[in-house]
Structures are given as structure tokens and as C-alpha cells.
Amino acid sequence: MSKREFQTEVNQLLQLIIHSLYSHPEIFLRELISKSSDALDKLRHLTLTDEAYKSVPFEPRIDLELDEEKKTLTIADTGIGMNEEDLIEHLGTIARSGTKNFLAQLSGDAKKDSNLIGQFGVGFYSAFMVADSVEVVSRKAGEDKAWRWTSDGKNGFEIEPAERSTSGTTVLLHLNEEGKQYANSWRLQEIVKKYSNHIAFPIFLTYDKSEWNEAEKKSEKKRTTEQVNAASALWRRSKSELKDEDYKELYKSLTGDSEDPLFWFHTKAEGSLEYTTLFFIPSKAPLDLYQAEYKTGVKLYVKRVFIMDDAKELLPQYLRFVRGIIDSEDLPLNVSREILQQNRVLTSIRTASVKKILSELKNIAANQPEQYLKFITEYNRPLKEGLYGDYANRETLLDLVRFKSTKVQGLTSLADVKSRMKEGQKSIYYITGGGESLLRTSPLLEIYKKKDLEVLILDDDFDEIVFAGIDKYGDVDLKSVNKTSTSEDLKDEAEPDKAESLKPLLDKLKATLGDRVKDVRASVRLADSPSCIVSDEAEPSMQMQQMLRAMGQKDMPALKPTLEINPDHEIIRKLLARPDDATQEDAAWLLFDQALLMEGVPLEDPAAFVQRLNRVLNLSI
């Protein structure tokens, strides 16, 4: 017998499960049945596609066996099974790096925390919520040896040789005080129907059934085995046959989520390609949504045979929050990830699936605005990512994303912004380059407020990159107020051009600032502030340049902003009246530095800024 220690993260996890997560313990059965179903899926796939496994008998079933007197429950399957190495890897360590985040995500709310068990793929350990000890006997398909893994969830685990007549895995639970409520056949059937009715393999329950003996006029217990699930692929059934509860139960079983999905979209396509898709939108964004190693949420089946559940080719990255199933009649059973990347059939299914999801969301946005608001609160950011890469669906995505605005509370659509455009307004305007509070107080918005023009507040860190490549919404121009060219929209033909009278000051300021600026010019966009900085059309803003350098683009050339000054501001008028004053040089730098600070850009030389500020303060006091 080999005695081994759990990986540190497993020890932490087990302590939390055993001592803290008792509010929702029935999920242990859902998780163990789900593991058995996965094992059967894997073996079925291998027997159909791998020559080495085609001779392995495949008689799929999951068996639950209850011994009420001994307070034990057994969950057995005829799936792929595990050898000694697999038992150590799968039951002694947490392999997926994202699972370690489980520990960091715990909230202290036992019900919410128990829900995380399934989402993070550590479902086997939920057995220790209801069992003092767990024994696993497994034999890997194609191998002769079986192995026994035992643990009390506290002092590591032991592995030794064992006997099992067929491939598969048997999990024996010695139920604890908390778990004894599940030593009840009616309770077990209720849980299976609630969570696992859709499992495509038969689930049998063996228990002592009470039957009335008419001859002896008494009730007798008879050992009975009954199938307790429907064992059909729910997604292949007609929508008219299914109730909302059927979809919700399937979703919870697929995802381990305890909450109902926001929406689901069930499609059966027939014609040149035949396939079925069932997509769910979780009510809360998946916890690994913004991790590089996010776990995909769509399972691929071919003719109801499970193929894989970790293929990132099934949907574009920006729809990585979608959960569900794609079941194709036309893909080969031995399809690999390499084949998926170039497969014409999958490309067609993917293209149609994306259009279906987006069109359904657009329909919900139009007809169920309150529900859509719940969705967009969770998924606005990933939809914006789609604008950057999914050119084919850009127009639809522009209708789906929502924006903060200077005009309305909460979020608004581009369609609504367009409907609020003033007569003679040439473009829809937006501002990027920082957090919401910084953007709302930017000097760049002053003239828009004065003219009562709406400006969208784009405060996600990648908004500038995304919208730099989008210049139209339908037939209306989209323009950034950070860019030099936008000022052309703001010119009032009735007002005289003040640039000529400012030329001596502009020249002086430009000479003082030298190569720190591309140009110094009179502004038509300022109302209350003396200065601001803007970038040329094809150049990133100053804050975006800072961000790109922070991301490692150290060799990025230093791009110069244009400094704009407000000809009507008192400071500028005073500088005009004192052309030879020695303070003009300090004023030039202070006007430039304050414009940088308002854009959230750190100063290159804070000490010099303070010295200049003190000199000017000294003169004014």
C-alpha cells in the first residue's frame, strides 16, 4: 500500500469543503454522476475512433447502490477508468491552474461557495461533504490491473492494487452524520431527476424496496434495481416537448451553476448541414472570463457522441461566456483540434451560431429591455472585444453594446444616441483615455456641454484601440473628441477666427515647448479651461501611449500631442497683453503640464513643474 500526501491546494480545499460548505451538500451526487458520464463519453469516443480501443466492450451505464443499514452509497460506471498514475493526478492534485483561483474566490457565503465547486472542476471533492471516507476502485480501459484509492479527506490518501472485472470506476461513500439523509432511495431518485435526468446514459438505482406481501399481510423489503433517469439527449428533442425547467436543469448540470441561466437559444438546422445547438447565457459572468487560460463552455458532440469540451475553435473568443452544446451530423467522429481549425463544416456551424446568438440578443434588447440590461451589465466588455475582430458582425455588435453618456444616467445604445442628435449635428462624439471620473471632468468636453451635444464616455482600457478602427455607425460618423480633426465640426461660421491675433503668443509657446509638442494652436473646443492636448487622427492618445509602454512596448516612438489654448480665457488674454514678460516661459510649461495632468498622464519632471508653479504663485500673492 502506497501512502501519499495531498497537494497543498487540495488540503486547503478539503478543509473548506468539510468544515464550511454544508448548505448545499446534495450537489455531491450531481458531481459524481457527471464525472461518470464524462468517463463514459470518453470511452465511447475512443471505441469509435481509436483502433486500440475498438475491441473494448462498451456497455454504458451508471449504477447507484444504496445500503441503508451500513449507510453506504456506491456510484459505479463502465467508462474509461483510471490507472495508478491517473488516480494520483486526478484525485491528489489540482491540475488546472484556474482551479487554484477557487480558494481566492470564496466569499464566506456557504451557498455561493458550494456553487463554485462545480464551476471550478473540483467536483469529486464534494464527496467529502457527506462522507467520512471515500474509496475509489478503478480499472483503465485496455489494461488488466485495477487500483484502489482511499482517503478520509484529512490525512492524504492511499493507493493499492485491487480487483475489478471490467473497465470503469466505482466510488464507495461511507456516509457521515450530514450524509445519512442521503441513505434514502426516494431522496436519491429526487436528486437524480433534479440534476441528472438529461444524462444520455442510463442511471440505475439498486435499493431495498418495500412491497406488500398479500399472503402474509405485511410489508417486505426486496432488493430492486430501477432506472431512474430519462437517458436521452435533451438537446436533440423538439423544443415543443421541453419545459423551461428542463433547460434550466440541463444548464445547471452542464455548468455546475446553482443559478438559472438568463437566456437559452435552441436551434436545429437541416439542409446542406445538419446540426443542433443549445446555447445558454449565464446570469453571472464566469469567474475566469478575463483569464488567459479561460475554460471554454461549449461541448462538441458528433451524432450524440461526446467529442471534446475544451475546443476554443467552437465560438469566437469574445463569446467565451456562452455555455452549451453543438451536436453535428456531418463532422467525422475522429475529429481533432488540428482538424477543427480548418474544417469547413465547423466553420459554417460557427458562423451560423454566432449570427444566431447575436440576433437573439438583439431581439431581447428590443423586446425585453430589463432582461437585456442584466445581460449587458455582465457582458458589455466582451462584446466590445468582438468589435475589434469580428468585422462580419460589427454592425450587429454596435447595436448590442452599451455606453455611458454625458446625457443620460446608466447605459445607452448608439441607436438612442443617434435619435437624440441635434439638428445640424454632424457626428456622434466619444471620449477615451482614462477612468469615468477623469473623462467626465476633461476640458475636452467643455464646448460640447456648452453646445448641449452628447458625448459617449468610453472608459474601458481598450476602448481607444477598439474604436480607432470604427469611423461609422450606419450613415453617421463616429468621432473622438481627443482628436485634432474633431474641432472642424465645432467651428461657428458666425464667430471671427481668433488664430491670427493669437499668432505671436502661439509662436512663443511653441518655441518654448520645442519638440515636446507637434503644434500649438487656438482651440474651439474649450470653454472654461485655458488649455488641453489632442492627438492626430491616426495616433494614440497620450494615455494610450503610456499604457502601451507599460505593456512592454518600450521601443514605441514618442508621439507628440498638439497643445490647444483657449483664446477667451483670462490667462491667455493676460499673456497676450504682456508679450515680453519673463513669466511667459513658465506659463507655457504650466499650460502644457496641466493639460497632461487632466488627461491622466504623469509629468516627466514633477520637480520642475513645482518650481514653475511656485514662481507664478509668488508673483500672484
Image: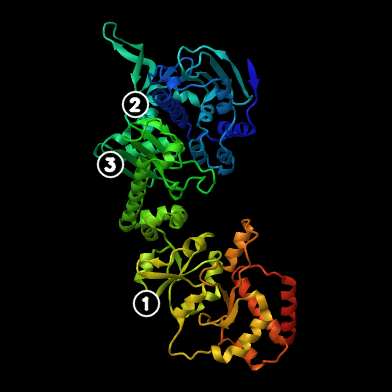
Q: If you read the primary sequence from the N terminus, does the residue marked by circle 2 or circle 3 appear first?
A: 2
Residue 99 in the image, given as x and y percentages of width and height: 56, 38
Reply above or below: 7 against 495. Answer: above
Residue 295 in the image, given as x and y percentages of width and height: 49, 41
* In-front residue for pair 376/352: 352
Residue depicted at 40% across the width and 30% down the height: 334
Q: If you read the primary sequence from the N terminus, does the residue marked by circle 1 or circle 2 appear first?
A: 2
Label number found at residue 291: none
Is 100 left, or right, of 475 in this rendering? right
Pointer 1: what residue?
Answer: 422
Residue 222 in the image, given as x and y percentages of width and height: 35, 11
Type of residue at label 3?
A: Ala
Reply above or below: 358 against 47. Answer: below
> Is the C terminus in the top left, top right, bottom left or bottom right quadrant?
bottom right
Type of residue at label 2?
A: Asn
Type of residue at label 1?
A: Lys
How many residues crowd mark 1 within 10 Å: few (<14), some (14–19), many (20+)? few
- Label 2 sits on a secondary structure element that is loop
> Is the N terminus in the top left, top right, bottom left or bottom right quadrant?
top right
Pointer 3: what residue?
Answer: 269
- Nearer the observer, disc 1 or disc 2? 1
Are discs 2 and 3 less than 8 Å apart at CB?
no
- Label 1 sits on a secondary structure element that is loop
Pointer 2: what residue?
Answer: 229
